[in-house]
């Protein structure tokens, strides 16, 4: 029970046997025995970070032992209270921890008054140290140092001054000074205790690792990032060897490494370690997931900064999908790996998904960390044998192992230093792919039936350049706003939309002032009706239809389409035939994906059924009939219109792992969808009624499904910028297709009018909600669909005619 380094499978077996023993003693009515077992369970679950279970067992121990008045019962009660106090410290419940540990100290002191036994002094010294940790957690650091020094005096009265107990007291004094931001004495005391703890427990033990972590934090706060990095690197082997037991080490270590790399401008490395820190916190939360949010509030609040700081870095880099997922993880609102089409979906136990590059980096670190771990495990086994008596030959072997450990540690450090010095070069290609010759743009515009403009937006480090190309002129404006600020403005607007925030007009007006206001007069003078947006970086994710000019949304004045310069576009409007259409949908739940009742409603509303009210008359396939084979079969004789309603899982940076969910539950990866097997040539419009199909990982890292299909031959794609509302989407789609097929509008105008109808609460809203499935009724907002979340997610990419 005292071994803190048990293998996970051994630890699991131990817990199972202890629980079995506890049940047996309970059945026998043996309170003392059941209390001892409960305390053992608490003490073992605590370092596994199963904090709430540990506290429950400690409280059971106290309940069963506190009735006794003899010395044994008082000793057991004190032990239960001490365990409960230690667990409470980890849970940030400091007031309770201080109370329980103080009561335990009182009981131990009373026992010593009775017995005068030296071993009780050891117990008193230990509880003084533990009470000090609770005071530190409550920011009462001077009191904590006093208790640690009291503990050290007690220890030195009964033990050698370099004992392991003395080492713990010394190291706690160092930690307390760090908490109090008194860094020089913090370093002095920590360096004094480190050789002692290394001698007694080994350099890769839990206590020695915490000491190195503390020294890393101290050096960072002293303004020595190189020294902090050196100490932090020495923590990684313990983390590699004890992934669950080291979760607290992981949070601190990875957060520190994130800070170091962010300070030096190595943002990609900083994001990697920021993700690892967040994932450690998510693992702690998962291990304690059975407890109510009110009980875990303190634990969440303590580490909320991990999510915000990581998201801030991602926003600076334009990695919006990841940033939104990280912020939502902290609130447990939205899944990251499986982004939902239905807006009300909730998934828990999510993690920050590593990109392919980050996975490779993490694997390299793990391999590097294993070398000193392996040497240490061999050394520890032999050291244990020698402690019980051994031969000279075994001692010689031990010395050889110690030499091997030193070599392994040196090799490890060299490997880690090499890894950390490899800074990934960013793609510094210019804007050639984004910007063609102005003359060719003007030729495109002169050929359009409606007054059209091309708005090109280039985000540079210190400014954003706005180029407006009209049929006979080009306007250039420079918006002097740093790239980070521009990205933050876009992110704030997207967050306000996706969270259906009241007052969303504010951040959307801010974007309007930056991106459209500088050229608004030129647009109005030219009588512009359609704006083709050719945007770089995160500006490609701006819902231009929802920008607000201070009095109204600009969708009232302009239709918008996204112009993809890298994909040659043939601006031709075919003769539209309602029968040249095909629809695919997913309604059933598959694994972590929820059911989509709105899809059945959507397909029924769009495609003619028995009631004959659908806009389209083509073929449809739902659920098990919709698989990759069915999609390929449809593309052999491509319909003019292809409508797909499903889930899309976006894992930024992982093109092979991002996928469209098929109706039979299979997954069509984004990489496979981009191959020649899925040739969309001949499809005039591919509508992807699924979440975030217009977005990639960070604005440039990977294409969304929409851009992939466009590059693979589709003339135009309608895709979404965020997880769409299951109740609202059928209404928008119905009005959009009616504009195309009944009113003869071009795609951009049909979408504009459908969006305005939803904004005004007109069009198909009443008609379709009366026919809507009962399961959707509760999803319809009382205020209607006027918020831009409901109507501005979709955009036209490519040929908007």
Image (cartoon, grey):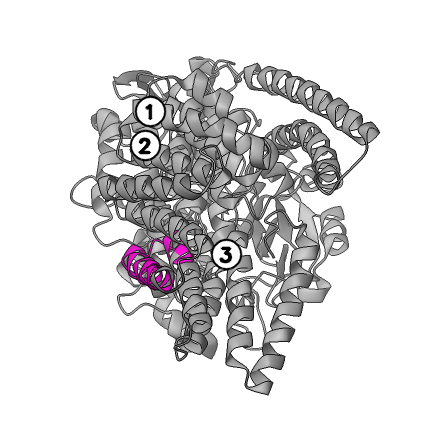
459 in relation to 765, above or below: above
**Could you tell me which residue is drawn at 59 percent across and 86 percent down?**
27
Q: How many marks?
A: 3
Q: 711 and 740: which one is in front?
A: 711
* Element at label 2: helix
Where residue 736 sits, quadrant-wise, is bottom left
* Element at label 1: helix
Quadrant in which the N terminus is drawn: bottom right
Q: Position of residue 203 (x, y in %)?
A: 58, 30
Q: Which residue is tagged 2?
A: 178
39 in relation to 530, above or below: below
Mark 1 is surrounded, within 10 Å at the Cα level, by few (under 14), some (14 to 19) or many (20 or more) other residues, namely some
Magenta-highlighted residues: 86-111
Determine if the magenta segment contains residue 537: no
Q: Position of residue 320 (x, y in %)?
A: 43, 38
Circles 1 and 2, Cβ within 8 Å, touching? The answer is yes
Q: Position of residue 46 (x, y in %)?
A: 50, 56
Q: 605 and 442: which one is in front?
A: 605
574 in relation to 524, above or below: below
Alpha carbon of mark 2 to alpha carbon of mark 3: how far? 24 Å
Mark 2 is surrounded, within 10 Å at the Cα level, by few (under 14), some (14 to 19) or many (20 or more) other residues, namely many
Circles 3 and 1, Cβ within 8 Å, touching? The answer is no
Name which of mark 1 and mark 2 comes first in the sequence. Answer: 2
Q: Which residue is tagged 3?
A: 46
Q: Which residue is tagged 1?
A: 221
Name which of mark 3 and mark 1 comes first in the sequence. Answer: 3
Alpha carbon of mark 3 to alpha carbon of mark 1: how far? 29 Å
């Amino acid at each position: 029970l005292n071994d803190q380094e048990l293998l996970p499978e051994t630890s699991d077996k131990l817990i199972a046997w202890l629980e079995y023993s506890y049940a047996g003693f309970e059945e026998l009515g043996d309170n003392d025995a059941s209390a001892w077992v409960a305390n053992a369970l608490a003490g073992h679950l605590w370092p596994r970070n199963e904090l709430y279970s540990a506290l429950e067992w400690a409280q059971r121990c106290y309940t069963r032992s506190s009735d006794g008045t003899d010395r044994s019962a008082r000793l057991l009660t004190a032990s239960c209270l001490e365990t409960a106090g230690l667990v409470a410290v980890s849970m940030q419940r400091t007031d309770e921890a201080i109370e329980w540990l103080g009561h335990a100290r009182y009981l131990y002191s009373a026992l010593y008054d009775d017995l005068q036994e030296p071993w009780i002094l050891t117990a008193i010294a230990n509880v003084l140290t533990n009470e000090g940790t609770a005071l530190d957690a409550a920011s009462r650091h001077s009191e904590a140092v006093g208790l640690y020094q009291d503990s050290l005096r007690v220890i030195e009265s009964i033990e050698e001054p370099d004992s392991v107990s003395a080492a713990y007291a010394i190291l706690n004094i160092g930690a307390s000074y760090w908490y109090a931001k008194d860094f020089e004495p913090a370093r002095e005391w920590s360096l004094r205790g480190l050789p002692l703890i290394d001698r007694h427990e080994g350099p890769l033990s839990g206590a020695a690792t915490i000491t190195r972590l503390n020294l890393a934090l101290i050096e960072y706060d002293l303004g020595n990032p190189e020294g902090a990095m050196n100490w932090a690197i020495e923590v990684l082997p313990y983390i590699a060897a004890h992934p669950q037991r080291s979760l607290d080490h992981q949070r601190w270590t990875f957060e520190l490494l994130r800070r170091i790399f962010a300070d030096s401008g190595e943002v990609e490395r900083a994001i990697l370690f920021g993700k690892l820190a967040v994932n450690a916190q998510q693992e702690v939360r998962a291990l304690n997931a059975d407890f109510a949010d009110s009980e875990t509030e303190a634990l969440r609040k303590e580490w909320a900064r991990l999510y915000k700081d990581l998201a801030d870095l991602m926003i600076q880099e334009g990695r919006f999908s990841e940033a939104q997922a990280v912020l939502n993880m902290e609130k447990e609102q939205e899944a990251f790996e499986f982004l939902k089409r239905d807006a009300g979906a909730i998934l828990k136990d999510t993690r920050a998904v590593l990109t392919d590059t980050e996975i490779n980096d993490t694997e390299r670190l793990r391999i590097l960390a294993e070398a000193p771990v392996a040497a240490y495990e061999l050394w520890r086994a032999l050291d244990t044998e020698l402690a019980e008596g051994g031969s000279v030959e075994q001692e010689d072997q031990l010395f050889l192992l110690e030499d091997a450990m030193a070599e392994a540690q040196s090799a490890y450090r060299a490997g880690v230093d090499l890894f950390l010095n490899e800074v990934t070069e960013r793609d510094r290609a210019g804007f050639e792919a984004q910007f063609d010759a102005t003359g060719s743009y003007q030729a495109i515009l002169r050929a359009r039936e409606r007054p059209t403009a091309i708005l090109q937006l280039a985000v540079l480090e210190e400014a954003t350049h706005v180029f407006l190309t009209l049929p006979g002129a080009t306007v250039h404006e420079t918006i002097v706003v740093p790239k980070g600020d521009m990205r933050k403005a876009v992110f704030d607007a997207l967050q306000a939309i996706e969270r259906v925030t009241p007052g969303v007009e504010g951040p959307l007006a801010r974007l309007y002032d930056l991106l459209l206001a500088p050229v608004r007069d030129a647009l109005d003078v030219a009588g512009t009706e359609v704006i083709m947006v050719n945007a770089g970086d995160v500006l490609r994710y701006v819902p231009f239809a929802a920008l607000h000019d201070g009095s109204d949304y600009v969708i009232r004045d302009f239709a918008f389409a996204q112009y993809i310069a890298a994909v040659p576009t043939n601006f031709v409007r075919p003769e539209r035939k309602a029968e040249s259409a095909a629809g695919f949908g997913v309604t059933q739940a598959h694994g972590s994906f929820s059911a989509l009742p709105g899809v059945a409603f959507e397909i029924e509303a769009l495609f003619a059924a028995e009631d004959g009210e659908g806009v389209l008359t083509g073929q449809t396939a739902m659920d098990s009939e919709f698989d990759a084979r069915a999609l390929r079969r449809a593309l052999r004789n491509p319909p003019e219109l292809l409508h797909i309603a499903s889930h899309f899982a976006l894992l930024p940076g992982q093109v092979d792992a991002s996928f469209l969910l098929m109706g039979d539950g299979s997954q069509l990866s984004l990489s496979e969808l981009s191959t020649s097997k899925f040739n969309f040539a001949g499809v005039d419009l591919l509508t992807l009624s699924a979440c975030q199909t217009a977005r990639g990982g960070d604005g440039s890292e990977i294409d969304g499904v929409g851009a992939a299909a466009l590059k693979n031959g589709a003339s135009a794609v309608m895709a979404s910028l965020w997880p769409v509302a299951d109740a609202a989407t059928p209404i928008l789609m119905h009005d959009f297709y009616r504009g195309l097929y009944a009113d003869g509008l071009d795609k951009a105008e049909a979408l504009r009018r459908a969006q305005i109808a939803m904004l005004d609460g007109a069009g198909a809203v009443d008609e379709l909600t009366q026919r809507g499935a009962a399961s959707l009724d509760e999803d319809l907002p009382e205020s209607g669909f006027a918020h831009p979340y409901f109507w501005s997610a979709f955009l036209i990419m490519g040929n908007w005619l």
